[in-house]
Amino acid sequence: MRKAKVAVIGAPMDLGAGRRGVDMGPSAVRVASLNARLESLGYEVEDHGNIEVVQPESVARKDARARYLQEIAKSCSRLAKMVEKAMGLGHFPLVLGGDHSIAAGTIAGVAKHLKREKKKLGVIWIDAHADMNTPATSPSGNVHGMPLAATVGMGPKELTHIGGYAPKVKAKNVVLIGLRDVDEAERENVKKSGVKAFTMREVDELGLRSVMAHAIGTALDGTDGIHLSFDMDSVDPDDAPGVGTPVRGGLTYREAHLAMEILNDAGALVSMEIVEVNPVLDTANRTALLAVELAASAMGKKILS
């Protein structure tokens, strides 16, 4: 990865969230000197700007079970095409959210590129929430709680079939890490889907090193690379206050960095996204600054080299 070109793509989506402000996340991360930090690691960075996303005020909520679904799906389709094109040029896509609904687009683009090359994708999803609701199980109707379900083929066709097929990833190659807030009906979706899930209790009991080793092995079992989907609310709000749905008891500052460093050591990352940075709720851009630090660790920053 060290010699690669990184394609930075912003996805200023806040249609899928219950609280406004994450549409400013890509700008906050850029202001925190993401591009300069990656260039200092030896990468050539090409910033593709932001995909088009409509403002919530300009459209009507048509379905309370999956609010703004059509508009989210259209933006995710645009994102998928940009990601697929970047990968076709041999670039590493780094997508900046926006709420987590954008993952349906990012993963669709990565998976379609790999499918064309007769390759398969694994996913490591680091998040306080499972994001495995469907319109039938979601208590809020917020689509940012549905993208992982869509990735493994569960939920509305508008999300599951971005790019024309489903599932994008086999559930047995998907690993959830850091869970500590899962909706009642969503628990059954997680269990029946076949994804591997590590709650924060398991992180505490097993240790993050062991969890990451298991996660990487699972995501790479019969696949050709890993997509990392990192929700900033996976980190404890003491270190990442600027997120829309903070939950106490998350990963510590060092645990988050360790996870990124172990992933880099594995040499298997083919794409990455960082989501749910909300500058409206942040303090002095702390959460965006941490997002940049974590991206740097995932992309090869070392303490002594």
Image (tube, grey):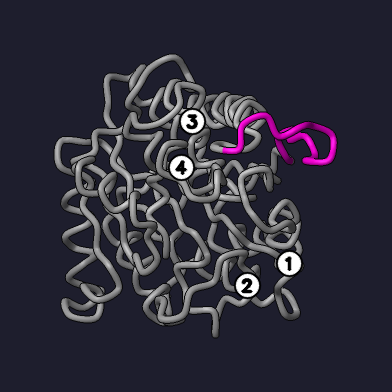
Dot 2 corresponds to which residue?
A: 287
At numbered mark 2, what does the secondary structure look like: helix, strand or loop?
Answer: helix
Amino acid at dot 3: Met
N-terminal label among 4 and 2: 4
Residue 133, percent from left and from top: 41, 44
Say whether disc 3 or disc 2 marks the residue closer to the N-terminus. 3
**First in sequence: mark 3 vs mark 1:** 3
Determine which residue is flagged by label 3. Answer: 87
Q: Is 93 placed left or right of 270 in the picture?
A: right
Q: Is residue 53 magenta?
A: yes
**Quarter of the image with the C terminus in it:** bottom left
- Identify the secondary structure beneath mark 4: loop
- Which one is closest to the eye, mark 3 or mark 2? 2
Q: CA distance from mark 2 to mark 1?
A: 8 Å
Residue type at the position of mark 4: Met
The residue carrying pointer 3 sits among few (fewer than 14), some (14 to 19) or many (20 or more) residues within 10 Å by Cα, namely many
User: Is residue 304 at all visible to an observer of this figure?
Assistant: no
Q: Which residue is mark 1?
A: 279
Q: Nearer the viewer, residue 79 or 143?
A: 143
Q: CA distance from mark 3 to mark 2?
A: 28 Å
Q: Disc 1 on helix, strand or loop?
A: helix
Nearer mark to the viewer, of 3 and 1? 1
Rendered view: 237 above or below 177: below
Q: Which residues are magenta?
A: 50-64
For mark 4, what is the residue?
Answer: 146
Q: Residue at x 83, y 40 (%)?
A: 57
Mark 3 to mark 4 CA distance (whole Å): 25 Å
Return the disc, 2 or 1, that comes first in the chain's sequence: 1
User: Disc 1 to disc 4, how far (Cα)?
Assistant: 23 Å
